[in-house]
Image: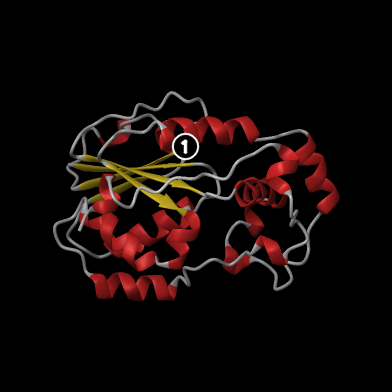
Amino acid sequence: MKQLKAISFPRSGVSIFCKILIEYYKNTPKKVYYCNTVSCCGHKQPCKKTETMDLDLIYMKNHDFGGKVANEVNKDIVHVVLYRKHAQEQINAYFRYSSGGRRNAEPLKRSKTYQTDGTPDKYMNYLNRKTQFAARDKFAKKWIYNNTNPNTYFLEYDDYMSDPLKHMTRILSCVDDNVDVDKMGKILKELDVRKHFHIKDSVYYIEDFTERYGLKDIDFDPSDRFLNNKK
């Protein structure tokens, strides 16, 4: 059984990632289970509910909030690490989700003025509390900079949204011998997978964000190694 583990900093594209997989394997002979919520098994790894199932693939999601998720090296376990390289976009995306709730989490459910609306004062208070700053740095250190697991695919948000077909077909090829590229392309078009929110055009943009808050953008290029280099 193949295992596909999505390890993501919150609001890095993991929801649409799972939705694409669900649509892709719908009405196919492949037996796939999606451990996508904490209510399933408490995000235990591997998912306890699947131990008695005869599966071809199990998908598991985890944000590794406690820093205890094992980075197991196993050819049948593919880790997909989802993150945003720009500190401002990562922190703001988490704020918009935590302050706006699930109603505004999905791009197609948002109002037409979502990008220019907002609560800048609330956001500034959030930034001054440094909420999620340490968590982001801890995640990046463990899962990006210090990650030597060769069975890892790094999925940076902007890169992902700029060419979702390339990334989804490459990732699927790691767990599936046959990838239907045409089918995947149609799914991506139907789901309108692209970057919907541009912070520079929003009320939240801060030009000197990284300098002001002492944060660094993630400078990491996995294109010549790991599973990102899979042909």
Q: Does dot 1 land on a helix, a strand or a loop? A: helix
Quarter of the figure with residue 59 = top left
Number of disc labels: 1
Q: Pick the quarter of the image with the N terminus.
A: top left
Closest to the observer, 178 or 88: 88
Task: List the residue tagged with mark 1.
Answer: 39
Q: Pick the quarter of the image with the C terminus.
A: bottom left
Give the x, y percent position of residue 159. Answer: 45, 60
Does 121 appear above or below 116? above
Quarter of the figure with residue 69 = top left
Q: Residue at x 68, y 51 (%)?
A: 96
Q: Residue at x 58, y 32 (%)?
A: 135
* Structure colour scheme: secondary structure
Q: Residue at x 75, y 42 (%)?
A: 212
Q: For label 1, count other residues whose C-alpha is less than 10 Å away and answer few (under 14), some (14-19) or many (20+).
A: few
Closest to the observer, 24 or 86: 86
Q: Amino acid at mark 1?
A: Ser
Does 49 appear above or below 228? above
